[in-house]
Amino acid sequence: MLPRVTKETHMKRTRTIRIAAAAAALSLGLAGCAVEEGQQGGSDKLTVACGAMEEVCDAWTKAFQAKTGIPTSFVRLSSGETVARLGAAKASPEFDVWHGGPADGFGAAVEQDLIEKFVPEEAAKIPDKYKDPNGYWAGVYVGALGFCSNTKVLDELGLDVPDSWEDLLDPKLKSQVSTAHPSTSGTAFTTLWTQVTRLGSEDAGLDYMKKMHSNVLQYTKSGTAPGQVAGRGEVAVGLVFSHDCVLYKERGMTDLEVSFPKEGTGYEVGGVAVIKNARNMDAAKQYVNWALTAEAQNIGPTVGSYQVHTNPEAASDPRMVTLSDIKLVDYDFAKAAAAKKELTARFDAEIAAQPKE
Amino acid sequence: MSAGTVPAVIEPSAATLPTPAKRRRTSGRAGVDVSTVVVVSVVVLLLGLMIVYPLGMIFAQAFSQSGWEVVTSMFTSAVNRGIVANTLVLGTVVGALGTLLGFVLAYIQVMVDFRGKKIFHLICLLPVVSPPFAVATAIITLLGRRGIITYGIFGAQTNIYGLPGLTLVLVLSFFPVAYMTFKGMLENLDPALEEASENLGGSKWQTFWKVIIPMLVPGFAASFLLLFVEAIADLANPLVIGGDFTVLASRAFIAITGEYDTAAGSAYSLILLLPAVLVFVIQQYWVSRKSTISVTGKPAGQRRLLTNPSGRVPLLVFAGLVGLVIVGIYATVLIGAFVKILGVNNEFTLDNFRYVLSGIGNEAIIDTTVLALIATPIAGLLGMVIAWLVVRRLRHGSAWLDFLGMLGLAVPGTVVGIGYAIAFNQPLIIGNRMFLPALGGGAAILGGAAAIVMVYTIRSLPSGQRAGIAALRQIDPSIDEASASLGATGVTTFRTITLPLIRPAFLSGLIYAFARSMTTLSPIIFITTPETRIMTKQILAEVDAGRFGNAFAFCTLLLAIVVTVMGLLSLIVRGNPAGRNSVGAAQ
């Protein structure tokens, strides 16, 4: 018996090697197709990375497609996700245009060389403070930071709707304020930088946040969550962009009320830009120019996006905040972006990690 | 390969009690034949493509300058040390409590006499389907500061955010894996063991501690490891209910999406791998020293159930309470789907379903279900094959293979997603030849669906793999050896002997794979395309837009789909009588 077994194993071994070799050859032969010329080239379709809410993304791309006939589709992504995805495949980006999402994301993308410099014709109409001085991106909407208060909870606490940053330090509001964490959310970083700007220095800004710390229930990860936490009545005041608060109220959280601090508040600018090495460069430029028009900006309020238009020709809506009625701080986006990393690290160490009194 | 690799000695399969590990070590693994070599190559190739390559691409970034700064800051920065500590605490607490809960419920299910076992089983399986946001939000709605129960009934303003809430959500979401593992193992225990113990004068209590528990050691180890890894890699729940309690997974997510720093995100994830590796190594060392064979192919008797009220009543009360909590949470999701905003505006409406069943919502439901259905059998089978290779076939490198299979789960989804974006969003071109077309992202073949199926597969295969390993360690290798000595190849043995024996583990692997695929969120964000709409992502968008009704409606539909598929899978896989009985009957 024994020799037969040995022979069999020997045969098996040769067969093993043969099979393995054949498999390897086959997989190489199948997979290793020669790269065809022009395969990496243009496309007649347009893909948009959209940083606004799903519905407005849908409405924007459909309207552009209807107007130009260029097949346009989108993926909804937060700005961090967009930068990460674009950074992952720089040479052959999957998107042609980036539409919506805060300016600091666009700043990070410019720094990583992901955005094509392009100043569309329509950009001439946009005020200078709402576009990139170097011409990489232009603003499509503006959102102002506000207090999103639950009037029912405020009534229980015997407080009025806050209209000053100092109001948030009231000991009666202990664990009754919700704000996001500045490293996770652009909204919360806007809050932090607003303090730095209005109080004159980083130390003074952090000092204010330190005082507010004991009144903060928790630092949420998402920038819009504080509005929902307030909407559910878990806290009295949430710090969010006012258009989100308006939306939540409209969607059923009827106790919510928007107010603004009289000392001045911060704001965000949502951008639009052409992606570097876009596969459909011509259509991308056409889209960016269109996104700045009054026609494109007027779509927002029809689908629940109540940010303020940057194009002065676009129609305003009663649900939007009138920027001339509130006080805005002099927000320096470039300076804010440069200070972000160090400032959020200080926030982590000096504030978030500290126990609440 | 010499003649020595063919099993030289076929031992009598008399040993049913724990036997010295040495015996299993020497003869436990059948000879390596051609089919095994081919299977190993294919599995390694698949894992290499789906896990090692994308993770390698991203971990390379952790060693860039900014990434390395983060790695070193783990030791220097108090904030980062705190995050590491939080992660370890969370993993240990969830691992221990989840394993314990799963064991107790499985023990009640198998060993205690009561009516309604089928219903109870379904309730225990329900949390397998926990769409991101749903369970956490339901708990916030029920038990939060303005919770329907805590505030509405007791008037207490409980703060559920942080470790307590997170533990509750994660234990509830993950214990079913432990439950299924223990249920399979307990059912496989030969009642003759218990009888023998009792005949020798052992009390029920002694039998429990000295006979049953030792036999379940691989189950405890497997569950703890899996739950630990799942808990520390979970992202959605720490984001929703974690509050100020930051863990490495959420820190990595923040680095990538909030700070635009992929390198730092990879570095945090690399650190996250260390505790996972550690637990893994401990588990390997601990379990390999014990043998817990209980399936020998010999006929088994009928189990006598626990009827003594002093044990039965407290156990059943506990089971009832847990069942009530689970039902309560899912009822909340269900009710939430039919009102405007649960707990805020409880007006009845059908608009939520009208919305999600039209347009994008409808596309998302179909796309997600189809892709998950493709990934499920791949993940289930791959998990079982890896388990079989690890326990039975491989002498060297079995620990490596086991670890490779687990990697897809041990790394936070965000990092897997970016790894996929880097690896697969452009074609792999070496020289002038394309070895792989772009598999993921907007410019990919099949609209980027291939990458999504791959992500689903690697995220869901580990649970099947662990269940398979635990189940196989219970089965006497002499059954395999008998098959081999009758001339069957390794693959034939696997198909005709092993697979039927581990059918319950295979089934739970499949169910879990499907449920997990349907509920995976974080890696998907980085590879969705306009052509592939994924439900979990739509849920997130609805929450963001403040339409909680729609989000709950999506979750309800997701639940309905998973439960339907679970039922169908049970019917298909359970088509024949259970494995042990058929082997027993054949004798």
Image: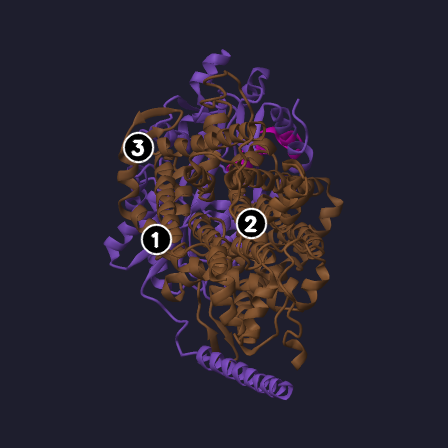
Q: Quadrant of the N terminus of chain A?
A: bottom right
SS state under label 2 = helix
Question: Mark 1 = which residue?
Answer: A289
The earlier-in-sequence mark between 1 and 3 is: 1
- Residue at the (54%, 57%) spot, across then down: B468
Rendered position, A2 above or below A273: below
Q: Which chain is purple?
A: A
- Give the image location of residue B124, x and y in percent: 47, 39
Q: Chain of mark 3?
A: A
Measure the alpha-carbon separation of dots 2 and 1. Answer: 65 Å
- Label 1 or label 3, whichever lies nearer to me, is 3
Q: Chain of mark 2?
A: B
Residue range in magenta is: A187-206
Residue at the spot 65% in from the left edge and 67% down from the top edge: B11
Query: Callout 3: 10 Å neighbours few (<14), some, many (20+)?
Result: some
Chain identifier, colour brown: B
Q: Out of A250 and A44, give the one closest to the viewer.
A: A250
Amino acid type, label 2: Met
Q: Main secondary structure of the magenta part?
A: helix
Q: Are marks 2 and 1 on the same chain?
A: no
Q: Residue beneath label 3, please?
A: A317
Q: Foreground mark, 2 or 1?
A: 2
Q: The disc labelled 1 sits on which kind of residue?
A: Asn
Residue annotated with mark 2:
B185
Q: Position of residue A260 (x, y in %)?
A: 46, 25
Identify which residue, A242 or B312, lies in the foreground. B312
- CA–CA distance in space, label 1 to label 3: 23 Å
Mark 2 crowdedness (10 Å alpha carbons): few <14, some 14-19, many ≥20:
many
Whether residue B129 is in magenta: the answer is no
Helix, strand or loop for disc 1: helix
Q: Of residues B31 and A49, which is closer to you in this image?
A: B31
Give the label on residue B560, or none. none
